[in-house]
Every structure is written in C-alpha cells, then in structure tokens.
C-alpha cells in the first residue's frame, strides 16, 4: 500500500492505472468506511482512499479542531482492507493559496443540513471536485448515511459531465441501530445510550407512512417533538422524494426520511430510504 | 475530421487518445481561432475543437440571439487546418436540464468585463469545466485577446487541480490593428473604420507608461475621454498587473492595459501586455 502526501507523486503513481475506484474520507475510519473500501475493491482494479479533514466544509463554530485524527490506525485498517493507494495531503497541499474558486452546488444545498450548515456543501463539492481531478477515478464510492451529500455529489457529477461513476454504500450500524459515524466518539456514555433513538424515530415515521399516514408535516412535527422530549435539539426531520430530495408527496415512488439532531454539542444524522 | 454532436460518441472517439489539444470556441471562426488551432496542432497529437455558443455566459440583454452562427464555413476552415475532431453540441446536449451547479469564479471575475457583464465568467468557467470533463484534453488553448478570461481559466485550473495545461495564443489583428473578433462583423462600415482606435489608444497608454508616466488613473481617464470624444461608450480602460490582474503599481514587472468599449451596440475588447 502506497501512502502518498503530495499531488505530483500521486499523479505519477496513478498515471498507469485505468480503473481506479476512489473512496474520499476524512479519516477516523470505522466499519462504515471499510464497507465503502470493500465496495470500491469490487468495482475497480486499483483502490485509492483519501484521508483529509477538509476545512472548507466546516463552519466557523463547528468541530474542525476537535475532529478526530487517527492516521496510524486508519492506515492499518486500510492495509488490512487491501487498499492500493492512500492519499493523505495536508492543508497546504490541497489549499496552497486561499481558495477563491468554488463549486456552487445546486439549490437543495441550502435545505436540510445546508440550512444549519451554510457553505457546507460548497466546501464538500469543491474538495471532492479537486480530489476527482487529482485521482481521476473511474468510480467513486460515497456512503448513504450522508444521503444529501450523496445526492448533491451525483448532481455535481451529472451537471458538470464528470467522467466518474458514483456508487453508493449502505449505512453500517452498531448493534443497537446507531449509524456509524466518527462523531459518535464525541458522545458521553449516557448520550451513547440515548443516541439510537434518532434511528428508531425515523423507523417509526417510515412505519406510519407505510401504514397509510401521508400527512408528512404532522409526522415530522411529532418525531421532532418526541426527540425534543428526550433532550435532543432537532435540526430537522424531513420526508422527501428519494430521487429529487424535494418534499415528498404521496405520489412519489421512493421516499427518504432524513433527520439531523444534536445531543449536547454532538450533531448526528441518519436517514431511511424506502419504497412507498 | 470527425464532426460529433453528442457526448457519448465523442467520449468513445477520444477514449484511445492520450494527447489531446483542445480549442473551445463559439464558432464563426476567423484567423485568430485558426492560429489557436495551429498552436494546438503543435502541442498535441489529437486536435479537438468545440463549437458552442454558450447561453450561460450571455446576459439577458446581450447578443446571444444575434451571435453569428456559420457552422458549414467553420467546418471547412477546421478541416483545412487539419483538425481531428470537432464537437458541435446543441444546447440540450450540454444543458439537458436547467443548470444549477456552477463554477464560482474568483473575485477578479467581478471586475473589468465582469463589472458590466455580471455572471459572464461564471458561465464561461462552467461550460469550460464541462467541456474539459467531456474532452479530457492534456492541453487547452485560449486566446490572449480575452485576457481576463484566460487569467480566470488559469485560476480555475490551478485552484481546482485540473489535469490540463493552459496554452495562450497571441491576438491576431487586421492590417489596421483591429483585434480579430466575431463581433467585428456587427460593425457598420463607418464603425469599422473607427474601430482600430481602441487598439491605438491602448498603444498610446503603453507608450506613456514606458516614457515614465506612472499615474495610471490619469492615463486611464485620458484614454477614456479620448475614446468618448470619438463616439465610443467606454466600459473601462485599466492598467493592471499582468500576472494577478490587480490594479498596477510602478513596481510591477509585467503590466497589461485592457480596454472594453462600445461603438453603437457593438462591444469590443482589446489589451496589450508589456514589460515595464
């Protein structure tokens, strides 16, 4: 496994590879990430993983400084997962000068997570586009846990005619249902016990919809109230069309219920996609 | 010479080419464009030219509808110039749905031509990025006549880590000095006689600077007044650092004097780069 920190060396290493499957990450790898690497392995002959905590996608009051950095452990896990190339640039490698050219993401970027994280998806799209230009993968793998991010990346790829095929990996969960996330590590023991309620609440919304309740606004409100009673600060619970991410209608074929809520300072997100 | 209108066919045609030199154009080709094709020929084994009048870079009151379209003549000229592949998409090929993902260009895009053409460089960068993703050239050729555009494209390529080398082609001029431009065709006979004054005025500014006059603001004002007296509506005359496009200082090594001015409804631009 080659661990490469600079762009020129990476380009040389990948120059002869015509079938690269790429997994961009922010490190602190868990079983969810490793499932994406597995998926990459099945889709491409050369598996490249990037580890970069991208400052451009963090707001001024967000957790950029505290975000867990565990490079040595990450590299062990990636070696065990038969990764071919790991790209671990530092900030001055990807941003040698102040970034003033960005991807302007689609309007859906202002909703859901974008409503409480202004500029987040602009930062995500910009770094992903840069990484695509550097790695030049044939396919790239993103997790469904970040459902809105996956949707926006697909939009970017389609509208900018990027020669990259996006593959989505299923969310990996702990035994109690909590979606795996690097931010779970922020949770205090009592918060960790409470945390799976986000997923359970989304499951209840799905069940109600499947049982015929199509008053989505009421379901969203009830789920929000329920979480709030248990000490959560809810950013949103939202029922959407899974293809367009527009607010759902009973005529939609595939829906997704998405939620973002905070326990203390820790912000968790989750979602469930389902056929109506 | 292969003339291709759709993206999938173009990708197939170019799939085996590893050394593509690309010249994006809006058609209505003149000797200036053909010099860029020549330059591409010298830099790459496969010369690809696109012809596409990009609606995204025209303002609502600009000349999108009138912009000259001369495809048959253009193809003859490109065949004579030994072009390998011409990409002539229509609007629905490049924009099959309303474009909502854009390149946000650097702040310099709001100045000079950007001040009177809001959104212009956003449209230019977005279509050029799309074309780069479709054609995947090793090098791309742009003319120095559109000096600010060339500067912004270079910024985009550098900041987005595009694997494309930008090559600049010299401005080609008519015998009387007028920079070749598709928009010269809009000029009435008496305007055509007047038109070279823009270049002569820029030459006078350069001469004054070389003679030691470093009061750039005064030179810009005098040049503007002079053109105005001859019936021009001046958008700007500006002395800039040729590397950064920031306002020039006497300490800068290489300067550029840029001008944009209208004769009637026809907007002409020109520039002269020179060492101080």
Image (tube, coloured by chain):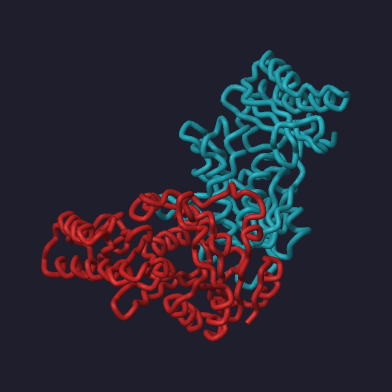
Chain colours: A cyan, B red
Q: Which residue sits furthest left?
A: B212
Q: Which of the two residues, A214 or A163, is positioned nearer the viewer here?
A: A214
Q: Quadrant of the N terminus of chain B?
A: bottom right
| Looking at the image, residue A234 lies above or below residue A245 | above
Residue A238: image quadrant is: top right
Q: Which of the two residues, B160 or B276, is positioned nearer the viewer here?
A: B276
Give percent across and percent down for residue B108.
36, 52
Look at 63% across and 77% down and name the residue there.
B17
Give percent across and percent down for residue A141.
70, 52
Q: Is residue B57 found left or right of A252 in the rendered image?
A: left
Look at 80% across and 35% down and name the residue there.
A252
Give percent across and percent down for residue B32.
42, 76
Q: Is residue A218 found left or right of A133 in the rendered image?
A: right
Q: Which of the two residues, B15 or B90, is positioned nearer the viewer here?
A: B90
Residue A181: image quadrant is: top right
Q: Which of the two residues, B267 or B101, is positioned nearer the viewer here?
A: B267
Residue A161: image quadrant is: bottom right
Q: Is residue B59 found left or right of A50 in the rendered image?
A: left
Give percent across and percent down for residue A150.
67, 45
| Looking at the image, residue B199 lies above or below residue B64 | below
Q: Which residue sits furthest front?
A: B189
């Amino acid at each position: 496994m080659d661990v490469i920190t600079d762009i020129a060396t990476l380009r040389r290493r990948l120059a002869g590879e015509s079938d690269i499957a790429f997994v961009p990450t922010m490190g602190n790898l868990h079983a969810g990430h490793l499932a994406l690497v597995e998926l990459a392995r099945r889709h491409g002959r050369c598996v490249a993983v990037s580890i970069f905590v991208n400052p451009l996608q963090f707001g001024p009051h967000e957790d950029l400084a505290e975000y867990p950095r565990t490079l040595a452990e990450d590299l062990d896990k990636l070696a065990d997962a038969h990764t071919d190339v790991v790209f671990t640039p530092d900030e001055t490698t990807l941003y040698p000068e102040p970034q003033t050219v960005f991807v302007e993401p689609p309007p859906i970027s202002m909703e859901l997570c974008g409503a409480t994280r202004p500029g987040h998806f602009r930062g995500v799209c910009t770094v992903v586009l840069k990484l695509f230009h550097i790695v030049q993968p044939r396919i790239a793998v993103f997790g469904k846990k970040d459902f809105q991010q996956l949707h926006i990346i697909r939009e970017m790829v389609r509208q900018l005619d990027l020669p990259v095929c996006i593959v989505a990996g299923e969310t990996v969960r702990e035994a109690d249902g909590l979606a795996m996330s690097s931010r779970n590590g922020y949770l205090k023991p009592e918060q960790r016990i409470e945390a799976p309620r986000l997923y359970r609440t989304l499951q209840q919304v799905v069940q109600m919809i499947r049982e015929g309740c199509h008053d989505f606004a009421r379901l969203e409100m009830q789920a929000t109230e329920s979480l709030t009673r248990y000490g959560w600060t809810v950013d949103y619970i939202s029922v959407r069309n899974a293809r367009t991410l527009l607010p759902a209608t009973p005529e939609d074929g595939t829906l997704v219920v998405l939620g973002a809520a905070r326990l203390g300072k820790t912000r968790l997100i989750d979602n469930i996609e389902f056929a109506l």
